[in-house]
Amino acid sequence: MGVTINDIAKAAKVSPSTISRVIANNPRISAATRERVLKIMKEMNYHPNYIARSLAKKSTKIIGLVVPGSTENSFRHPFFPEILRGIGSVAYKNGYNILISSANTAAEEKQMAKEFAVGGITEGIILMTSMIKDPAVSELKKLKFPFVVVGRPQDDNEVNWVDNNNFSISYELTKHFIAQGYKKIAFLGVSYEYTVTIDRLEGYKKALEDNGLAFDADLTVEGKFIDDKGYDLMNKLFEKGIIPDAAIAIDDLIAFGVIAAIREKGLRVPDDIAVAGFNNAPLSEYMTPALTSVEVNAFTLGIKAFELLLADIESEHKSFNRAIVPGELIIRKSSIKTF
Amino acid sequence: MGVTINDIAKAAKVSPSTISRVIANNPRISAATRERVLKIMKEMNYHPNYIARSLAKKSTKIIGLVVPGSTENSFRHPFFPEILRGIGSVAYKNGYNILISSANTAAEEKQMAKEFAVGGITEGIILMTSMIKDPAVSELKKLKFPFVVVGRPQDDNEVNWVDNNNFSISYELTKHFIAQGYKKIAFLGVSYEYTVTIDRLEGYKKALEDNGLAFDADLTVEGKFIDDKGYDLMNKLFEKGIIPDAAIAIDDLIAFGVIAAIREKGLRVPDDIAVAGFNNAPLSEYMTPALTSVEVNAFTLGIKAFELLLADIESEHKSFNRAIVPGELIIRKSSIKTF
DNA sequence: TTTGCATGCGCAAACGCTTGCACAAGTTTA
DNA sequence: TAAACTTGTGCAAGCGTTTGCGCATGCAAA
């Protein structure tokens, strides 16, 4: 169906190799033939077949993106599109396209990663995950295939990764509450499967400690980023008869639910309970009250992830690198004492 | 480097074709050899090379997604990730992966679409665009390559598309305002390059007309989905000395800016000016006041887009189809008269 | 005039897989 | 018992490129 390099060769009365070399801008081709071939290519509306080229060159200019859970679920959270934005912005500049896959279970994720790696279709992989024990990570490590993971892995030996300074930014946020005199600060949504939430929890603990406040496990509620609702998490506290004076949610979307629960109980934000989140959801600033949050610069994380991946793909001598993108505390009314 | 089908063949002392047939589950292979080969494949950690397979089979199981503007910009708006979610949810079930590309200009977009189509790497394309004159659309039409566009094209001859019932849902929304007695209803953010905004404008006009209100061009402000800010658009009205009693924004994100402008002028929403948007941004319901909007079901749009594409790819006898996903009017406080 | 090198191009193998055809051996049918 | 199928496998061409090597030709240096 399509016109191939051979068709052009015949039409130009040269060999296919010459055509190939014209395409590759090989200097050993005379200007005359080059012009002639290019003209014929245009006339015959020729376009190289990337599959065939990839097979011959063993290079596809495609990177794989494996998203945790289903694309269906993950992209519900603005964080992932933002990462994708970042990756895309620099990938295209470097001539790479992005192949997305997703997996519902950790096993599927590992399988996809493996297929991407070993199937010859991608040159590198970005894992949008940061689970403590990630089968996909160990698999890729074993295969010695270039990859980068978004989120610090528990064991970061021989892996490239990007992340925020979750510990210190959480420390800052907690300090911000303490400085205003809040003493009973809840922490909602920690999940012990993900380093990101653990790092944030640790930052919170350390800030309490450094300021003479005891860590109270009862003020910590476990939960999941996307699946759980802040509304439920907050109510778990209430049901235990605990009423904190401040609440840090692991994510803004969780925070919105937290606020709803607080209001349903007839309490006010921030007057009765101050609230803050993480990840600075696009509309957090428009809320009433505007939500204090942490801008994690997911866009930048995406950029860095790609850059690290590219370096890995192109490097002769392997090394493993990381990039830490600082988060920024964004203080808004939801966490500011009004009295 | 990788172990190939030939390596397995040698190890199993059969021909490569036999291996290939085992992989393809060809019934002409005896159970005995099948088992033996499978065992060896596992032992030697064999994985088929998708590039080679694609070249031989002329089928890649990859669809292309070309997003307008840069991924960088588009994914800023929640609409696109939602579409992607939808596409992904059904693509993976059908064994397809998604290759994303993006383009800053219409020309680049056409180029990318062409490369995807003719480069043999994708089997079909989804265009996330709905420009009036879309070079990518005409190109793909010319190439007779399977594709679906999200958003009704101006000339929908020989193209598959999915869209909302923008005209009637906008009609409904406008009627909702009129029914409450609003008379001076502004329409912000129409862009004459995109059918979606034009359809919505037309629905608005028709609703005015059907209810004895004259269409006033001064109440319409041009603008762009993503690039323009609602704040600026609303102020354009104010600067002309026009104070409407209601405002329909082409998008919720625009509506947020509109509300900001209204408040800055010392007016109240909805008491002084009622406001509504489109596309039901994730957090519109959390705003104060909660924002009236139209749920466009982008997720479903994505699903339908893929289904149409798949049908096109697999069909022997070409036909061109469309799917119209109804939007739902979601009335919240921002558009309800309180007095 | 010989040697040597640069230039311009073609040959053919390779990339890893699929598949139409052929063929031998075994099994059924007439 | 011959003919006709069925079953299981191999052969080899093909998918559209790339690329190492080789071979003319022409020109400059010795």
Image (spheres, coloured by chain):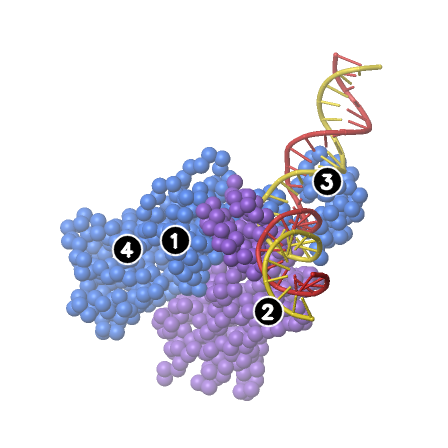
Chain colours: A blue, B purple, C yellow, D red
Residue A192, labelled with which disc? Answer: 4
Q: Distance between the residues labelled 1 and 3?
A: 46 Å
> How would you rate the neighbour count of disc 4 (Cα within 10 Å): few for under 14, some for 14-19, many for 20 or more?
some
Proximity of marks 2 and 4: CB atoms separated by less than 8 Å = no
Q: Share a chain, discs 2 and 1? A: no
Q: In this view, does A311 lie to the left or right of B29?
A: left
Among the two numbered marks 1 and 4 on one chain, the one whose residue lies closer to the N terminus: 1
> How would you rate the neighbour count of disc 1 (Cα within 10 Å): few for under 14, some for 14-19, many for 20 or more?
many
Dot 2 falls on a residue whose secondary structure is: helix
Q: Mark 1 points at which residue?
A: A129
Residue B311, labelled with which disc? Answer: 2
Proximity of marks 3 and 2: CB atoms separated by less than 8 Å = no
Q: Which residue is drawn at 26% across and 74% down?
A: A264
- What is the chain identity of the residue bearing mark 2? B
> How would you rate the neighbour count of disc 2 (Cα within 10 Å): few for under 14, some for 14-19, many for 20 or more?
some
Q: Share a chain, discs 4 and 3? A: yes
| Residue A164 percent coordinates (x, y) | 35, 49
| In this view, A12 is above or below B168 | above
Q: Distance between the residues labelled 3 and 2?
A: 40 Å
Tag 2: residue type?
Answer: Ala
> How would you rate the neighbour count of disc 3 (Cα within 10 Å): few for under 14, some for 14-19, many for 20 or more?
many
Tag 4: residue type?
Answer: Tyr
Among the two numbered marks 1 and 3 on one chain, the one whose residue lies closer to the N terminus: 3
